């Protein structure tokens, strides 16, 4: 979570940070360390390292570890995605008893087994939500560069230009808007069954970007038939 003071580990030498990542790979017995592994076993917060070295990929490179396929474990990520979907459907933070079919694909006990307690699962989920999107995308791009070229190039920041909105980005937009339609104010909490959509403010077809500043929460009714009309208010 993002409460660490920026100055806090300023004087820790690079070598010490990298040595700590290597020691985590020894604990887990893997040839790579995900951010999720690191936040479990490491001495520092993963963002201390991504700030220092610009990306998690560079951290792994310096530690001479394999670039991770994912910043988080695959099972973590599946559980987070399901948790986000349930949270959106409820319009509020779920309790572990909410985690059951048909609302949830995974039961509350699965989360408790995997993360320790339900609160730990929520904490990890928030950490996952707080991870910089562009950073993750950057790593994916970097992976493509390595696999096709067989050598490591300078990380390139490529702005994602796509209409589709990832579940994580949608979740952030809903969270910012309080899980409420920005037009009529309906929320799944006050109006069970209301479905929330994430809508481009400046239409994507007219050059509007898919980023948090150009997205807003609408209920399916308010979103219906809106087409490409430009926001006027
Ligand atoms: Zn509405």
Image (tube, rainbow, N blue to C red):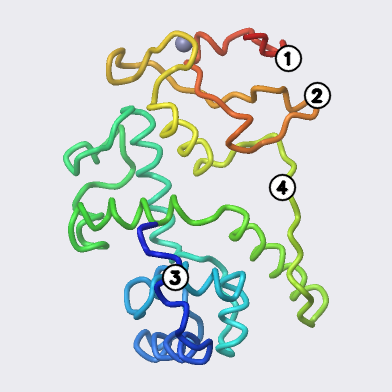
Q: Give the mark nearer the N terminus: 3 vs 4.
A: 3
Residue 87 in the image, given as x and y percentages of width and height = 34, 35
In the rendered view, tell whether residue 63 sits above or below residue 111.
below
Q: Tag 2: Cα neighbours inside 10 Å, few (<14), some, or many (≥20)?
A: few
Mark 1 → mark 2, Cα distance in angstroms: 8 Å
In terms of image quadrants, where is residue 177? top left
Q: Is residue 104 left or right of residue 172?
A: left
In the rendered view, tell whether residue 150 sits above or below residue 80.
below
Mark 3 → mark 4, Cα distance in angstroms: 30 Å
Q: Is residue 201 left or right of residue 33?
A: right
Label 2: which residue? 206
Label 4: which residue? 160
> Quadrant location of the C terminus?
top right
| Nearer to me, 27 or 181 | 181
Residue in the picture at 37% in, 71% down: 39
Label 1: which residue? 228
Is the C-beta separation of discs 4 and 1 under 8 Å?
Answer: no
Mark 2 → mark 3, Cα distance in angstroms: 42 Å
Please identify, in this view, whether the residue under mark 2 or under mark 3 is nearer the observer: 3
Label 3: which residue? 7
Q: Is mark 4 within 8 Å of ligand 1?
A: no
What element does badge 2 sit on? helix
Q: Give the mark nearer the N terminus: 2 vs 3.
A: 3
In terms of image quadrants, where is residue 59? bottom right
Q: Give the mark nearer the N terminus: 4 vs 1.
A: 4
Mark 3 → mark 1, Cα distance in angstroms: 46 Å
């Amino acid at each position: 979570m993002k409460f660490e003071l920026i100055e806090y580990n300023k004087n820790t030498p690079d070598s010490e940070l990298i040595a700590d990542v290597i020691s985590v790979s020894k604990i887990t017995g893997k040839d790579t360390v995900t951010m999720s592994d690191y936040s479990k076993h490491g001495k520092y917060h993963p963002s201390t390292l991504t700030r220092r070295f610009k990306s998690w990929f560079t951290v792994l490179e310096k530690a001479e570890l394999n670039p991770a396929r994912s910043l988080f474990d695959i099972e973590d990520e599946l559980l987070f995605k399901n948790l986000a979907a349930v949270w959106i459907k409820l319009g509020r933070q779920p309790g572990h008893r909410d985690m059951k079919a048909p609302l949830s694909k995974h039961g509350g006990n699965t989360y408790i087994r995997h993360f320790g307690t339900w609160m730990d699962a929520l904490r990890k989920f928030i950490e996952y939500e707080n991870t910089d999107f562009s950073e993750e995308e950057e790593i994916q791009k970097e992976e493509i560069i390595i696999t096709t070229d067989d050598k490591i190039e300078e990380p390139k920041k490529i702005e994602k230009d796509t209409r589709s909105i990832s579940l994580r980005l949608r979740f952030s937009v809903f969270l910012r808007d309080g899980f409420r339609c920005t037009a009529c104010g309906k929320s799944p909490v006050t109006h069970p069954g209301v479905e929330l959509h994430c809508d481009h403010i400046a239409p994507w077809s007219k050059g509007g970007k898919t980023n948090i500043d150009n997205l807003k929460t609408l209920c399916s009714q308010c979103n219906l038939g809106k087409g490409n009309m430009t926001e006027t208010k």
